[in-house]
Image: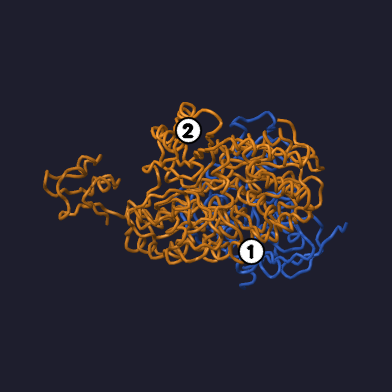
Amino acid sequence: MLQHVNVSIDGAIIRAVRGASVLDTAIEYGICIPHLCHVPNLSDIGACRLCIVERVVNGRSKITASCTLTVEEGMVVLTSTDKVRRLRHNVAELLVTQAPNSRAIQDIAVRCGVTKVRYAFRNDNCVLCGRCVRVCTEVWRARAIGFVGRGKERHVDYPFGVRPPSCKMCDNCVQICPMTITPCDGPMKTGEERLCGNCESQLMIAEHTPSACTWCRLGEGFSCGRYAGKRAS
Amino acid sequence: MPRLNGYRELEHLRAQLLKDREATKTTVMVCGGTGCQASQSPAVIDAMNRELSRQAPGPSVRLCVTGCHGFCEQGPVMIIEPGNIFYCRVSPEDAFEIVSQTVMKGKIVERLLYLDPISGRRARTESEIPFYRAQDRRVLSQNRMVDPCSIEDYIATGGYSALVKAIRSIKPKDVAKEITASGLRGRGGGGFPTGRKWSECREAPGDEKYVICNADEGDPGAYMDRCVLEGNPHLVLEGMMIGAWGVGANKGHIYVRNEYPLAVKHSRIAVEQARSFGLLGNNILGSSFSFDVNIARGGGAFVCGESTALMASLEGKVGEPRPKDVHAVVDGLYHKPTVLNNVETWANVPAIINQGSAWFASKGTPGSKGTKILALTGRIRNTGLVEVPMGTSIRTVVFDIGGGPVNGNGVKAVQIGGPSGGCLPATKFDLPLDYDVLSEAGSMIGSGGMVVMDEESCMVDVARYFLAFLQDESCGKCVPCRIGVDRMLEIVTDITAGRGKPEHIDLLEDLADTVAQTSLCGLGKTAPNPVLTTLRYFRPEYEAHIHDKKCRAGVCKALITYSIDANKCTGCGVCLEGCVYGAVTGKKKQPHVIDPRLCQKCGICRSECKFGAVQVN
């Protein structure tokens, strides 16, 4: 069986590892696709929908999340068409209005072109990206936290609300949470939420694992702050 | 009952059953479906049983409790053979007269016949009733004469002959070809060609394959699958067996909502009976084909009607959808190739195998073949279960079968396809029921729920209702569906509460498009449809809510005021008595007045007033 397949991402023909996701392939090649719930070496659930791309099949394009899309021979993917940018902007806007207190989410939103929002801020503390749940389940095999409830009631909790013995207080769930990075001037007060747009992405894991996030300088695909600044000058 | 070990034994049993039934001179068929049960058909059945055993004991009269007959508005309904006499709105007190007159003497009890409100005549048989006349009952045809708890009834009416035909004379790979040739498309909503699904699953690698029957019907106002599974579970089972034979599956699942107790009960009985007859299990009818069915009960989540969420739920996981980039026909239940079809789709299969794909394809439009069951509800005269050929116009369904609107109001819109479908205005009523035509118009046939709305329905409020439903039923996994639908609900609620801003319409459209395109599963992808279609066809209503702060239908409480027309008011005082908030004042025989500060807009005064003096502005 072939170990590699050829895919076209934004016109570049990339020799990708069979079984890899389009998101991993693109990032490895240097095409940046913004993402939030994707963490290297954890399974992908396709929850945040920031990593959406346009997949072209027989001349018809379909929007799909790239983290859960596995590369196939001859696959054609576009990561930064006008349509994708517009949709990504709208999704980022939904996220940042839900949880304006996260520097990481603010940063992603700003990089997706959200400069002002059209909804009222909501000051939730969790956007249910599921990073903590997956790191607990898949890396530490502790299954100490999980999703509870459905729809608006969905939240992360211990089984039946009690911390199980399998939780070793490793703090990984806290480390990996996009909400735990303190915003510049401390938490925003209710009613004073804003988008400053000056933050760099500070997702902790990002600095050590280059494929994790938005530090790269190739972020043209979603008008990365640094890149956009250079282009403007 | 001994196991049937061969095709001949089944035929022999069928002949035996028919012979046994020759002694039965009269059959009384009473609807025991959920609709009629709600209008006390169990009491009618008890009373009939009592009267029959008193007045006509012996095998000559048989009482058969059947599934849904469709005309739920007139329930409980009863058909008496011979003569095909159709009685409706039967009460337990009528049992004596029915048995003594109709059963014993063959005389008709006039007052129990259906009264046609238009012609003013009584209809003797089903075929004389306009509700049934325009229908073409194929899937539902057996519902009226088969006891769902009796496999003998089903076999006696030719049941399981399609299975025999398939196993004996059709190669598995030709089953999918036959279905493809028939043009059958999924009846659950998507309208995916069933034959293509089967052949893709057949060709998918792997020895272990599954067939699933999706009976997790959760659309508000829809109960097609419920009635098919309740009324004729063996038909669905037979369809599943043929499907399993075609794709090479040995295991099937029926995923039925726990809120359908009768459907759960009847499908369980059907599976037990089929097992004891050797129609399920190893070496069915002496052939090499083995197949068994498991009944799984759903916990009431609407999202579990979505195929991948349903499979997750079947696997014992949380009922959440997963990305569908690889189809279930390759990677489905337990990551094995799986065919998942809706109840109605399975129920169509036996007839296609028995009578051929050409027979099936003779009805319908070029793109949509066969018949479709619709659940007709809302502000309409004849609510009930309707089966019409594809291509029938919406007008025919609403006016000819449905009998038009109640209270003489004009029909404003029809909501087709449940929360995922859309509202079509009266100007679009000439559109045929066709998957492609309706989806072009922004709606969809969906599972077949059809809610008729009249001028007293506010379309913005309808959109709000469906958004609230979807927001409540969203699993919450992905951002666009969880937050996006919630934001849409927030905006639409603002509009209905008089806080709407002009830019809200554009924002709604942009957001609806985002949710539709970026959501993970079918629930989210179709969630904006109610908003998109109402915006497309009823934009002036949104604008009136936003700019003029008026709700012309008189539904949105923040935008209406109640007042009393002094010219019409006779001062009878009924409204004054009725008002729980003390908002109505006035002296006897003098026009009354509503105090807008106290009025809570409950509408009691308006419904109480016999002179139409209470007005809504």
Few, some or many residues within 10 Å of mark 2 (<14, 14–19, 20+): many
Q: Nearer the viewer, mark 1 or mark 2?
A: 2
- Amino acid of disc 1: Cys
Q: Colour of chain B?
A: orange
Q: Residue furthest top?
A: B54
Badge 1: residue crowd in 10 Å (few <14, some 14–19, many ≥20)? many
Residue shown at the point (36%, 52%) measured from the top left:
B121
What is the C-alpha distance between the residues marked 1 and 2?
A: 72 Å
Q: Which chain does the residue under circle 1 lie in?
A: A
Residue at far bottom of view: A233
Residue type at mark 2: give it: Ile
At which x and y percent is residue B596? 23, 49
For residue A224, the mark is 1
Q: Is residue B6 visible?
A: yes
Quarter of the image that includes the N terminus of chain A: bottom right
Q: Residue B401's quadrant in the figure? A: bottom left
Image coords of residue A37 (percent x, y): 65, 50
The numbered dot on residue B287 is: none
View extreme (front): residue: B105
Color of chain A here? blue
Q: How far from the left and from the top, in percent, is residue A174?
A: 64, 41
B274 w.r.t. B372: above or below: above
